[in-house]
Image: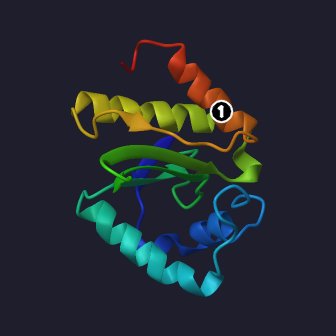
Amino acid sequence: MQLRNVTPDDVDAYVRMRCDPVMMANLGGPLPSERIPDKVRRDAAEAAADICWIKMILPDPDTPDVVAGSVTIWSHDTDDEAISEIGWMVLPQFQGRGLGKRVARTLLEQARDEDRWGVVHAFPATSNAASNGICSHWLNTTTLC
């Protein structure tokens, strides 16, 4: 498994993740496909500028054109403060292999090692058992604290 920054060439992977009603069921619903190229350009620019970490998941470094999903850490404002948040999406054909857990851990360890982002929050839907399992794992380990 390998992570790399999103690039403008990742439109197809974004369409598969963000235009899919099942993948986006707990994230406000699918995005219109015509908005995806602009979204990818903006995300690639932000990742290149190190404003946020938007990483594409490559399940096998020997096949760099195969993308299994993404993992992201970004900051945003709430009502009275800025918070850092992590989120991940793993395409259905790659689910059940532990990729979500591995990529979240990899990015959180990088954030810790670089002393970046402060406390990182995750807000999976209560109905998303797999993502809640990943969050539960973090609560039961001290390696990332």
Residue drawn where x is 32% and y is 55% of the image: 52
Q: How packed is label 1: few (under 14 Cα within 10 Å), some, or many (20 or more)?
A: some
Tell me the kind of residue under disc 1: Asn
Of residue 144 and residue 13, the one placed in the foreground of this image is 144
Left or right: 6 as drawn, with respect to 117 = right
Left or right: 14 as drawn, with respect to 82 = right
Q: Is 42 situated above or below 140? A: below
Secondary structure, mark 1, is helix
Of residue 106 and residue 139, the one placed in the foreground of this image is 139
Give the color scheme: rainbow, by chain, secondary structure or one colour: rainbow
Residue 54: % across, % down: 41, 55
- Please, which residue is most extreme toward the bottom here? 34
Count the marks: how many? 1
Residue 73: % across, % down: 40, 48
Residue drawn where x is 60% and y is 51% of the image: 89
Left or right: 140 as drawn, with respect to 113 = right
Q: Quadrant of residue 22?
A: bottom right
Which quadrant of the rendered structure holds the C terminus? top left
Residue drawn where x is 65% and y is 37% of the image: 131
Q: Quadrant of residue 28?
A: bottom right
Residue 78: % across, % down: 38, 52
Q: Is 91 situated above or below 2? A: below
Q: Quadrant of residue 66?
A: bottom right
Residue drawn where x is 76% and y is 41% of the image: 127
Residue named by callout 1: 132
